[in-house]
Amino acid sequence: MAFDADAALERRRLRRSRGRWRLLAVAAVGLALVAGSARLVGGSDHIARIKVEGLITDDAKLVKAITDVADDPTAKALILQIDSGGGTTVGGEVLFNAVRTVAAEKPVVSLIGGTGASAAYLIAIAGDHVLVRETSITGSIGVLFQQPDVHELLAGLGIEMREVKSSPLKAAPSPFQPWDPAAEAVLRGLIDDTYGWFRAKVADRRKLDGARLDQLANGQIFTGRQAVANGLVDAIGGEDEAKAWLEAERDLPADLPVRSADPKQDTVDWLSAVGAASIQKAVLDEWLTLDGLRSVWQR
């Protein structure tokens, strides 16, 4: 077979071209890793910003993002941007504790946006200073258990749900059976105990007690202006006011930049959250199963 010089040169050019692209790809990956590492360790001194939005649950990634701020020597403070109507009581508890972990090491300012009610309000008061907008919705201090009763509907359709269980209070109350007063008494005990826990957090963090606490912790919501007047939050403001407070009260430099420290989700996590998790939370957990007590403002 005759030697084709042009073909050989073309193959050499292709190999060189592929080599250059491989080198560029490796360099890009390396730069991404360096940038990611810099983000994780915090880089230069800054104020960390984390958003708490949507339905509040026991979110391990969000908890880790918050507690990581406590261990980051370059993060000099934490600003929590809150916009949520609440969620599960356990979700509020774990995030409250995470914020208090940070507050033990460095200052935390909570910013309530459109809504910061119920479990979201609980998380907000874990901060050292709480700011709201004038028209924010906040408060809703209370605990909720809801469940539909469909047994009459099923009976009308000729459907009967039969159960075999170890004791009468197992999986009670059930949406498929008439409401059981004994099960209601058990739930009332759970609600009262959890509500007492919530009230104690509010009393401690906002220095409220007695009749004043009774008046404010009755489940009602407040505008931002009403919340300031009632001592549920500290002042009206946003991020600029948060930075001004950190400068005046905690001696942080006025020019300290604010950087996002929100947890990042990969594609699989995102698809799961949008798809299966959304359906499960919105339909199954909220209506058909016992998903723990909820501390949420029902809009």
Image (cartoon, rainbow, N blue to C red):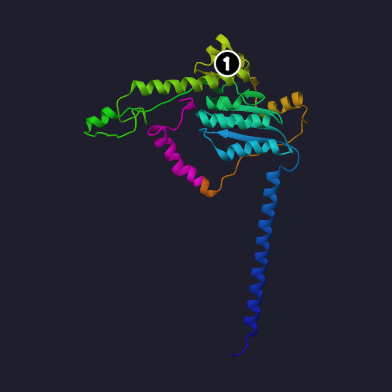
Quadrant of the image containing the N terminus:
bottom right
Left or right side of 259 for 115: left
Say which of 230 and 20 sits in front: 230
- Total numbered labels placed on residues in the image: 1
Q: Position of residue 99 (x, y in %)?
A: 63, 31
Classify mark 1: helix, strand or loop: helix
Q: Position of residue 23 (x, y in %)?
A: 68, 64
297 drawn magenta: yes
Does residue 83 lie above or below 189 as drawn? below
User: What predominant SS class does the magenta segment belong to?
Assistant: helix
Q: Nearer the viewer, residue 167 or 137?
A: 167
Three-letter code for the amino acid on which mark 1 is drawn:
Gln
Quick one: 55 or 25, which is closer to the camera? 55
| Residue that protrudes farthest toward the top in the picture | 211
Q: Is residue 237 magenta?
A: no
- The residue lying at 66 percent from left, 74 percent from top is 13
- The residue singled out by tag 1 in the image is 226
Which x, y percent locates residue 91? 53, 32
The picture places residue 274, in percent across and down from the top left corner, at 47, 43
**Which residue does the image show at 65% across and 73% down from the upper left?**
15
Which residues lie in the magenta part? 270-299
The vertical placement of 272 against 119, above or below, is below
Residue displayed at 65% across by 31% down:
101
- In the shown orientation, is residue 178 left or right of residue 1? left
